[in-house]
């Protein structure tokens, strides 16, 4: 059993699970396994995706972004710190909403799902 879990973990890493290209179906399938190491790897990957989204949004709000008339993707309260758990909850909420609406294909990149949720809950005025 341990050998099988190790193979699954290596397979997920080989498939580049940490990238923003991870699709919802792969994410949900990996979560079903309830393997602690795999889930920790996914959680850390989601945190990395969230950090990338944060810095992209921050660069848009910089002087350079403003000079190029760029608009932020989302506008959270100034003193809010978004944690890894927040990003995971945002992703799960967006997946749930898409399922309930009957529009989830499973091919959606998880990074885009996180961006969509951030835009929904922190709209820019």
Image (cartoon, grey):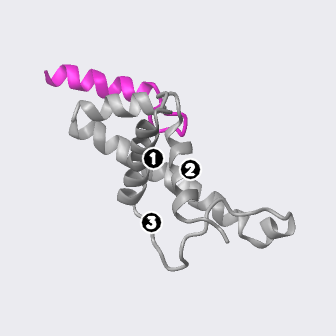
Q: At 41% across and 28% down in the image, what residue appears?
A: 26
Image: magenta residue range? 1-22
- Residue toward you, 81 or 94: 94
Q: Is residue 41 above or below residue 115?
A: above
Q: At 32% across and 31% down in the image, what residue appears?
A: 30
Residue 21 placement (x, y as % from top left): 54, 34
> How far, Cα to Cα, is label 1 from label 2?
8 Å
Residue 11 placement (x, y as % from top left): 37, 23
> How far, Cα to Cα, is label 1 from label 3?
16 Å
**Callout 1–callout 2 Cβ contact below 8 Å:** yes
Task: Specify the quadrant of the image occupied by residue 52.
Answer: bottom right
Residue that numbered label 1 is attached to: 94
Residue 39 placement (x, y as % from top left): 29, 40
Q: If you read the primary sequence from the N terminus, does the residue marked by circle 1 or circle 3 appear first?
A: 3
Task: Specify the quadrant of the image occupied by residue 38.
Answer: top left
Q: At 47% across and 75% down in the image, what residue appears?
A: 80
Residue that numbered label 3 is attached to: 82
In the structure shown, which secondary structural element does the residue marked by tag 2 occupy? Answer: helix
Q: Quadrant of the C terminus?
A: bottom right
């Amino acid at each position: 059993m341990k050998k099988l879990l190790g193979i699954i973990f290596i397979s997920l890493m080989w498939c580049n699970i940490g990238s923003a290209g991870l699709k919802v179906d792969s994410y949900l399938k990996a979560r079903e396994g309830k393997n602690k190491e795999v889930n920790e790897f996914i959680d850390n990957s989601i945190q990395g995706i969230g950090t990338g989204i944060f810095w992209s949004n921050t660069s848009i709000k910089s002087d350079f972004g403003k000079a190029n008339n760029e608009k932020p993707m989302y506008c959270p309260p100034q003193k809010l710190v978004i944690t890894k758990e927040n990003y995971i909850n945002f992703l799960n909420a967006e997946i749930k909403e898409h399922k309930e609406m009957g529009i989830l294909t499973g091919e959606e990149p998880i990074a885009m799902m996180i961006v969509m949720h951030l835009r929904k809950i922190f709209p820019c005025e």
